[in-house]
Amino acid sequence: LTPVGIIGTGKYVPERVLTNQDLEKMVDTNDEWISTRTGIKERRLASEHEASSDLAFQAAQVALEQAGITAEQLDLILVASITPDMAFPSTACILQDRLGAKKAAAFDLSAACSGFIYGLANASNFIAMGTYKYALVVGAECLSKITDYTDRNTCILFGDGAGAAVLGPVAEGRGFRSFELGADGSGGELLKIAGGGSRCPASPASLEQKQHYIYMAGKEVFKFAVKIMGSAAEEALNKAGISKSEIDLLVPHQANIRIIQAALNRLELPEDKCMINLQKYGNVSAASIPIALAEAVEEGRVKEGDCIVLVGFGGGLTWGASVLIW
Ligand code: ACO
């Protein structure tokens, strides 16, 4: 099998900032509650003209440039999102056209906040098998468009943005060492958008019942997340034959600082070995991990040969972790 790694990363977040102080004026909440319960201080919001493919396009261009390849060289484009531009065509096809990636196959992938890791696993297999050479994996979300800004339980958490990675062949000894993917569909009711699909098509009633907004049973999701982040990362490390003490940087899903701290405890890692940027962007679902990874690269926190662990969880319920040597 060909060794496969990430050869370029990029991120894009919209300009508009929504702070905790702004939210104080919208719902019955306060900066102290949000900061201590979640760690989030502000998040970015797309404009009414921006959709997920627009954010994905910006992030993808940065990643392609860093990888030193052109869009025409891409064989595959994979977009993970719970806020695609529309039901179909896929956001990946919209992005393919925008980039001019004429020879790339393109499809979307639905695994909520774990979507980016699911995407890496898919794309890397195509390259390892020799089917394709270069793939673009993007996590792109406009969660503000499916958030009920009268619901204080959810509106404080979410933001918009996109993160991208270009995958390609790398030197022996580098690249992905393992993936651990999982799902527990019995927890699907805990985190969902019920409306707009074939079970509950869009209708005046679905609008009135707010079924096009994110529903979340926060406490139950929290308990699941605390357990699964540590165990998924450990499982991926076991598969790779790498010990916890060898981790140079953990890049977790940026949902809640308390969930990240629980994972750090379980992995016996100090906070300085963890990329944390949720204070600036909130939870951006499938885009959280690639935005955090791209920002870690920008900040010079990732060096050749480093052991990087990516881990996330989300609706489905789903989870995913990966170990890679940079
Ligand atoms: N401001 C002030 N008070 C609030 C707010 C708020 N924004 N939100 C809730 N409260 C109140 C609640 O009403 C509750 O009051 P009560 O005790 O009188 O009923 C109290 O604060 C405590 O609420 P809890 O739900 O117990 O708070 P908790 O400590 O569990 O934190 C949170 C809530 C932050 C949502 C947490 O449960 C969490 O992070 N859950 C996981 C969320 C997550 O990661 N989701 C992933 C979704 S990603 C995706 O797939 C899109």
Image (spheres, rainbow, N blue to C red):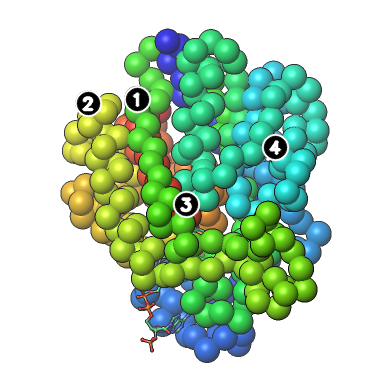
Q: Nearer the viewer, mark 4 or mark 1?
A: 4
Which badge, 2 or 4, comes first in the chain's sequence?
4
Residue type beneath disc 3:
Gly
**Residue tagged 4:** 92
What residue is at 44 percent from the left and 77 percent from the top?
A: 34
Left or right: where does residue 141 sit relative to residue 186? right
Quadrant where the N terminus sits is top left
Q: Please tell me which residue lies in front, 106 or 185.
A: 185
Q: Are marks 2 and 1 in contact (CB under 8 Å)?
A: yes
Number of marks drawn: 4
Residue type beneath disc 1:
Arg
Residue 22 coordinates in the image, percent (x, y):
60, 80
Q: Nearer the viewer, mark 3 or mark 1?
A: 3
Q: Are marks 3 and 4 in contact (CB under 8 Å)?
A: no
Residue type beneath disc 4:
Ala
Q: Secondary structure at mark 4?
A: helix
What residue is at 78 percent from the left and 22 percent from the top?
A: 102
**Residue tagged 3:** 316
Which badge, 3 or 1, comes first in the chain's sequence?
1
Q: Nearer the viewer, mark 3 or mark 4?
A: 3
Quadrant location, ligand no. 1: bottom left
**Residue tagged 2:** 241
